[in-house]
Amino acid sequence: MLAITLLNSSATFLVSGTKVATVVIDPGHGGRDPGNMGKKSKEKDIALKISLKFGAYIEKNHPDVKVIYTRKDDRYVDLDERAVLANKVKADLFICIHCNSEGGNSAYGTETFVMGLSKDQRNFEVAKRENSVMLMDENQERYEGFDPGSPESYILFTLNQSAFQESSLRFAQKIEDQLKKKVGRYSRGVKQAGFWVLWRTAMPSVLVETGFLSNAKEESYLITENGQDMIAAGIYRAFKEYKTEIESINPKDNDQ
């Protein structure tokens, strides 16, 4: 039987301020976990490069924003520790960077996920693949009996919906709009799925799938310096737009 322990209310409903002051960037996978594999690349490497470029844009243009990475080099970070870090520093935004994969060479495009349940089988498969990383962790007790391959395990997500879903959806849509309209990528849209790392974070959170390494054309784009920079710049512009919008809601609380 699945053992379910809900997050305590203080962790789940921690309210972010109106100022976007701290951002945690989470490059997917790392170390002994390569993530999805292309013919010429590994997801962990591309995710890290895009993440560092994205963070550099924020640091250059918004020196008032503290940028924290779950990893800055090729190391393995437990799935649960990524969310723990974001909660510990009381981040105002949590962004996971990943690369997609699907059987064959036909799937392409970007998609940005927020925490939620979906009846779409493909969305479930994406979440199941990302959540399976937890099976590599030495301490399985931290996952409270969660089985990433069992649909029944995802029941726990319905028992404790994110208090930050609206803000997460808003940011996610801005990312997809930027990647489509400014970067020129095909957008598969904003989607919801049961990602453990997003569910455990107590702030607006998104997971960006920047493209398919199973698609030769997209892999060729993602492994280039220019491609990585274009994706990073697109996510940054979405961040800038989101930050401006959020801080304009109650400008008297900000220093600007």
Image (cartoon, helix red, strand yellow):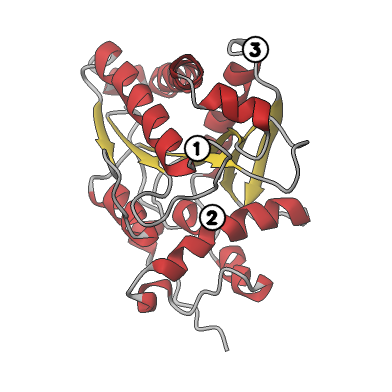
Alpha carbon distance from label 3 to label 1: 26 Å
User: Is 51 displayed left or right of 193 in the figure?
Assistant: left
Q: Residues within 10 Å of mark 3 (few under 14, many from 20)?
A: few
User: Is 244 displayed left or right of 81 in the figure?
Assistant: right
Task: Residue 130: give its label.
Answer: 2
Q: Is residue 7 visible?
A: no
Q: Which residue is mark 3?
A: 181
Q: Amino acid at mark 3?
A: Lys
Q: Which residue is mark 1?
A: 41
Q: Is residue 239 visible?
A: yes
Alpha carbon distance from label 2 to label 1: 18 Å
Alpha carbon distance from label 2 to label 3: 27 Å
Q: Amino acid at mark 2?
A: Glu
SS at badge 3: helix
Q: Residue 61: x and y, percent? A: 29, 11
Check whether the beta carbons of the residues at disc 3 and disc 1 lie within 8 A of each other.
Answer: no
**How many marks do you count on the picture?**
3
**Up-down relation of residue 31 to residue 43 (above or below):** below
Q: Residue 91: x and y, percent? A: 30, 40
For image coordinates 36% across by 45% down, the residue present is: 15
- Quadrant hosting residue 181: top right
